[in-house]
Image (cartoon, grey):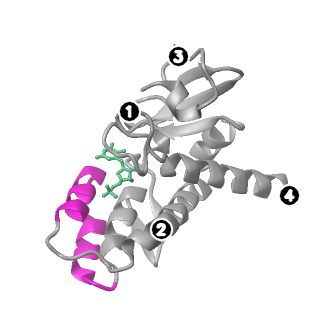
Amino acid sequence: MLQSEILGDYSNAGIIEDGLKLAGERMTIFFYKVTDPYGCFSNFSLHSVHLQGHDWPTSEHFYQAQKYRDVDQALCDRIRQTPTPEEAAALGRGSQVPLRPDWEKIKPKIMYEVVREKFSTHADIRAILLATGEELIVEDSPRDAYWGCGLDGTGQNQLGKVLMQVRQELRAKTAT
Ligand SMILES: Nc1c(N[C@@H]2O[C@H](COP(=O)(O)O)[C@@H](O)[C@H]2O)[nH]c(=O)[nH]c1=O
């Protein structure tokens, strides 16, 4: 993936360390796998959230279960209770049950809600997020051109945008 494809104007991209690339004066933080630098930005990171009266082991559990909210409560519960985010994603993606009809419309709001809750709950990762300053955050997903930047780097990076929006909101909160 080329930096210039994500940032447009910026050139002279060069890798300076894992997870960080130089683009003109601006740094970009790339993340994807939990074990990589900035892996805590992934929805698969083991940081629980408390939403809708339940504890969810990861933000991925919550996100995937919301696909079936008010459609199949048993499946929502099964996703919440499955041990790993990988299994939660597999259940959420692999079901024969149709997704809630407004899913495409509602999913950005769901993602924002759960990511905000995750970084509001856990002070250690909130500090990591706030320490990124104004850097661009990009989910370097090779297969998701909606939440991530996709294989060729031209994707929408909606998860990166959510993280940057949450960062801004939490910074404003900590400043008051
Ligand atoms: N991090 C990460 C993934 N990316 C995550 O997958 C979710 C989108 O799922 P869906 O809307 O069902 O396509 C969203 O949370 C996105 O950040 N996918 C993976 O298979 N492995 C991973 O390590």
Query: Quick one: label 1, few (<14), some, or many (20+) residues within 10 Å?
Result: some
Distance from Cα at disc 2 to Cα at disc 1: 26 Å
Residue 141 visible, this angle: yes
> What residue is pinned by disc 1?
152
Sequence-wise, the earlier of marks 3 and 2 is: 3
Q: Mark 1 falls on what kind of element?
A: loop
- Majority secondary structure of magenta residues: helix
**Quadrant in which the C terminus appears:** bottom right
SS for tag 3? strand
Q: Identify the magenta region.
A: 70-94
Check the image and report above or below for 87 versus 109. Answer: above
Q: Is residue 82 visible?
A: no
Tell me the quarter of the image containing the N terminus.
Answer: top left
Q: Secondary structure at mark 2?
A: helix
State the separation of the CA atoms marked 3 and 4.
34 Å
Check disc 3 and report the residue beneath it.
17
Q: Nearer the viewer, residue 32 or 158?
A: 158
Q: How far from the left and from the top, in percent, is residue 99?
A: 27, 75
Q: Which residue is mark 2?
A: 110
Left or right of residue 134: residue 15: left
Which of discs 2 and 4 lies nearer the camera? The answer is 2
Q: Which residue is mark 4?
A: 176
Estimate the spatial distance between the alpha carbons at disc 3 and disc 2, rounded to whole Å.
32 Å
User: Residue flagged by tag 4: what amino acid is it?
Assistant: Thr
| Residue 16 lies in the magenta stretch | no
- Precedes in sequence: disc 3 or disc 4: 3
